Image (cartoon, grey):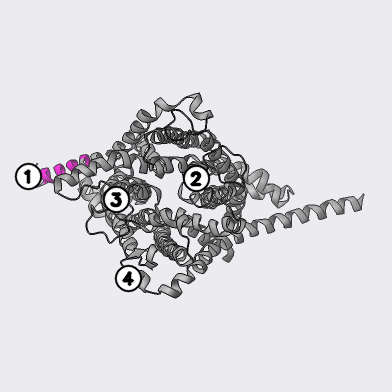
Amino acid sequence: MNKRLQLRLATSKVFEYFIMLLAFLITIPLFAIIYYVLKTGLSKLSWHFITNIPKPVGEIGGGIANALAGSLLIVLVAAVIAVPIGILCGVYLSENRNSKLAYWSRLAVDVMQGTPSIVIGIVIYFWIVKPSGSFSAISGSIALAIMMLPIVIRSTEETLKLLPSSLKEAGLALGLPYHKVILRVIIPCGISGILSGVMLAVARIAGETAPLLFTAFGNPYLTTNVLKPMQSLPLLIFNYATSPYDEWHDLAWGASLILLIWVLLLNITTKLITRKWKVQF
Amino acid sequence: MDVVKKVFSYRKIRTETAFKRFLVFTAIAMMVIAIAIFLTLVIHSIPSFQSLGTRYFFGTTWDPVSNVYGALPFLLGTLITSFLALLISIPFSYAIAIYLGEYQTKGWLSELLKNIVELVAAVPSVIYGFWALVVLVPMVRSLEVKVGAAPYGVGILTASLVLAIMIIPYAASLGRELIRLVPSDLKEGAYSLGATRFEVLRHVILPQTKSGLFAGLLLSLGRALGETMAVTMVIGNTSILPDSIFSPANTMASVIANEFTEADRTLYLSALIELGLVLFIVTVVINIIGKLIIKRFSNE
């Protein structure tokens, strides 16, 4: 081998290792965060922690029951609003690929997806909070629903696009009405893709703070009234993390751990579901 | 009997039409929401347009107490943090894209890295912010002591670092898809001419994916511009013109997050909403351009 060839091969090899090194550096911040949250949050976790509301500054103990219940409720309501509408809109977009309306609607979905979450918070403040005169959990749910919609719509559309048209034609040839073909044939066939989109969307909004700042607002007490301000895990973490009190920092770390577990579990389950239920055509 | 049949099928047809109409309704609803978001922001920014005009964008002082609203510190703060974050993230996101798209497309190692990247995208931003506040801020502070800057710890650099981590997954996963789309006969042609792997990457894959990789950057930038919580927690929330990358600042999103619920005067609130409008327009335009590039790219 001549010198030049050796040099070229060496460059190639060095570059490969260099790329590999850079690529795997991303693991450091991720594991650093998981490690730190585990280290500081794990000792706070207890039955007491998830069944009690925060105590005033200076008192030992207290938990995050209000934030946990609030988060579950706000996210649940958001999903109830966004999932049916999102799936149906996704169906429309995949069924009418070339219509003018579909084009503009798709653009609108892109716009919604690109909207910063804090802007959604502002908008919902003017749509719901201001007219109704008070911060409320339901306004937070609606803000989160608007964040969920593009994800659900896109995943539904992309999944259904991949289904062969023979499925739909077979259903219609048997005399099934259109809505039954969609609801009983098309959607069940694409359910793994749709479901993974829904779960990713839920995982995403579960950690959102910005749209809740001016809508759900936060509440130091436990409430299930969706017309009243409500605490949520991300809000609690934000408020307590930026406070000067050590007790509150501790609560925030415990809440961070629960939120992190929640979000990561959702992501991992989604993966397992898509792998197990995947229907190939 | 006949009548029963007729009624039954009419009902069937009615449900069918109703269903189709409902599908159209959902598609229209998305347009209504998108337009309504824009109009809401515009309408509530009007007081600020009227009394501040273009002074708003060039004013360097933001002092709600004396009713002076200049948004330049936030515009600059947003631009500097986002671009700095983008700059930091580029080597890593492209390395991941190249590694997963070309060097290691299959196998447990690539699966592992792929999952890790997805988890990085999944961690809520408020947790990034909290972590950065406790871990990154002291690190940056000791760096500032070393270089002789004022040791705030919080500031543009800290915000950019945490933002960089958060946006790596976006450019990385898109880049990976695009690198995989490069036709293998092109690569094989180059290999058969005696090109090394590095040369194939440099002279075949890179030119082929250039526009797509750029689109990935745009989408990352869009995310960085609109990111609120993590930045708000570590940028220092100071409404003055930043003079170095160590100085505490404010971004458009962070100033909205901090001051929106305190804004008691119409003009104050309206000035904040105009920030939201600018942010909305910029991120939406960046996102749409990025998506158009990708669409053109994947059609080719």
The reply to whether the magenta stretch includes residue B1 is no
CA neighbours of label 1 inside 10 A, class few (<14), some (14 to 19), many (20+): few
Q: Which mark is residue A3?
A: 1
In the picture provided, is A108 more to the left or to the right than B111? right
Would you name the residue on which mark 4 appears? B58
- Residues at badges 2 and 4 in contact (C-beta under 8 Å)? no
In which quadrant of the rendered view does residue A61 lie?
Answer: top left
Residue A143 visible from this viewpoint? yes
Query: Nearer the viewer's eye, disc 3 or disc 4?
Result: 4
Q: Residue at x 58, y 63 (%)?
A: B32
Q: Is A146 or A50 nearer to us in this picture?
A: A50
Tell me whether marks 2 and 4 sit on the same chain.
no
For numbered disc 4, what is the local secondary structure?
helix
The span picked out in magenta is: A5-17
Amino acid of disc 1: Lys
Amino acid of disc 3: Ser
Amino acid of disc 2: Ile
Would you name the residue on which mark 3 appears? B160
Residue A279 visible from this viewpoint? no
Tell me whether marks 3 and 1 sit on the same chain.
no
Would you name the residue on which mark 2 appears? A205
